[in-house]
Amino acid sequence: MTDDIFQGYKGDALDVLKKYKVRVWGQAKVETTRGTFEGTVLPRAENDDDQHIVVKIITGYNIGIDIRTITDMKETGYKKANYKIPEKQFPVTPGLPKVKLFGTGGTIASRLDYRTGAVIPAFSPGELYGAVPELADICNLETEKVFAVFSENMGPKQYIALAKAIGKEIENGIDGIVVGHGTDTLHHTGAALTFMCQNLPVPVVLVGSQRSSDRPSSDAALNLMHAMKAAGQSDIAEVMVCMFGPTSDEYGLLHKGTRVRKMHSSYRSTFRTIGDTPLARINRKEIMPIKKKYNKRRNDRNVKILPYFSDEVTMLYYYPGMKPDTLDAMVDAG
């Protein structure tokens, strides 16, 4: 078997696929110490780890199987898919703002391969233009993948890398920045970047999707269009989270990075501003400020990046009957 049929796999995960002679896009039965899984083996991104094999199971969900739990694999069928969104040259339009999209590992936009049920991700400007052509009417787009991690694995290391990348782009003259991010910890990253990226002269907008693009109710494309518009055309120079407003498709909301929280695992309108009001409403035609006071966009490039994070701080919730030993143990742990 040649490596071109193991798209994106490397190291230990690649060795496992070769050992059991299972190809990417192959229908496989995977025996593990946690149970048996059946589905289509999906490709992986070049920056992903080498400890997991991704399978789209028959329910339609994608799961990552830890290779250390695999006891046997068998390929039961094969349907090769075209794992690439047709690219179109992203047009450069004089007069439109220049926006930089940072990828962190989630799927920003995608299309469904109906033969396999696999979601094909888009990230390059050409791929995004092919998936969401309306973006060309909003901005001139550049993209960069900063790293590739699941949102639940985001932490200080990733926050610092993002803050530095944001500072560099602002100094280079970008008009706005969008960060594509998984929704589970989107609000945590928003808060961290708010403290690390101070005195911003341009908008920094975090965006994700609650439902993937292979679902009719997906919010991915609309959230992305709103985020690009906010980054390129809004005069709010703050770290913001841009997600659905009401459950309908009427508008999105721009939330302050330190005030937003995810309230439900699957609702499209799950992100809420807590203890305050959102910064603005946004749709494809206009941005409607809700708050009167916010940091305004500036023409200078004077941004203050503070890429520091202490992991010796934690949060402990008091509950009735809590013993002092709990606090002592945390202090002893450093």
Image (cartoon, helix red, strand yellow):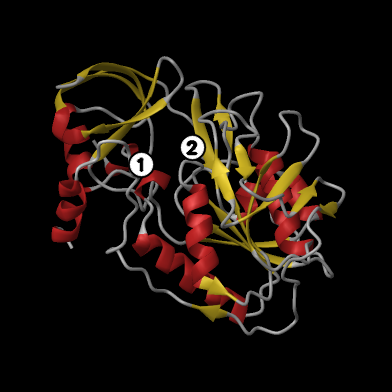
Q: Is residue 309 visible?
A: yes
What's the residue at 38%, 32% (across, down)?
42
Asked if labels 1 and 2 touch by Cβ distance under 8 angstroms, the answer is: yes
Taking depth in this image into account, of 236 and 45 the one nearest to the observer is 236
Q: In this view, does 185 lie above or below 178?
A: above
Residue 236, x across and y down, in percent: 74, 65
Per the image, label 1 sits on a secondary structure element best described as loop
Residue at the farthest front position: 321
> Where's the N terminus, which quadrant?
top left
Q: Residues within 10 Å of mark 1 (few under 14, many from 20)?
A: some
Residue 10, x across and y down, in percent: 25, 47
What's the residue at 29%, 43% (across, down)?
9
Is 65 positioned to the left or the right of 254 in the image? left
Image-quadrant location for residue 217 = top right
Taking depth in this image into account, of 39 and 280 the one nearest to the observer is 280
Is 285 positioned to the left or the right of 19 in the image? right
Q: Is residue 134 above or below residue 155?
A: above
Q: Mark 1 points at which residue?
A: 7
Q: Which amino acid does label 1 sit on?
A: Gln
Q: Name the residue under label 2.
A: 83
> Where's the C terminus, which quadrant?
bottom left
Q: Can residue 103 be seen in this view?
A: no
What's the residue at 51%, 58% (across, down)?
191
Is 90 positioned to the left or the right of 16 in the image? right
Residue 157, x across and y down, in percent: 35, 63
Per the image, label 2 sits on a secondary structure element best described as loop
Residue 113, x across and y down, in percent: 54, 27
Q: In this view, does 124 lie above or below 133?
A: below
Q: What residue type is labelled 2?
A: Tyr
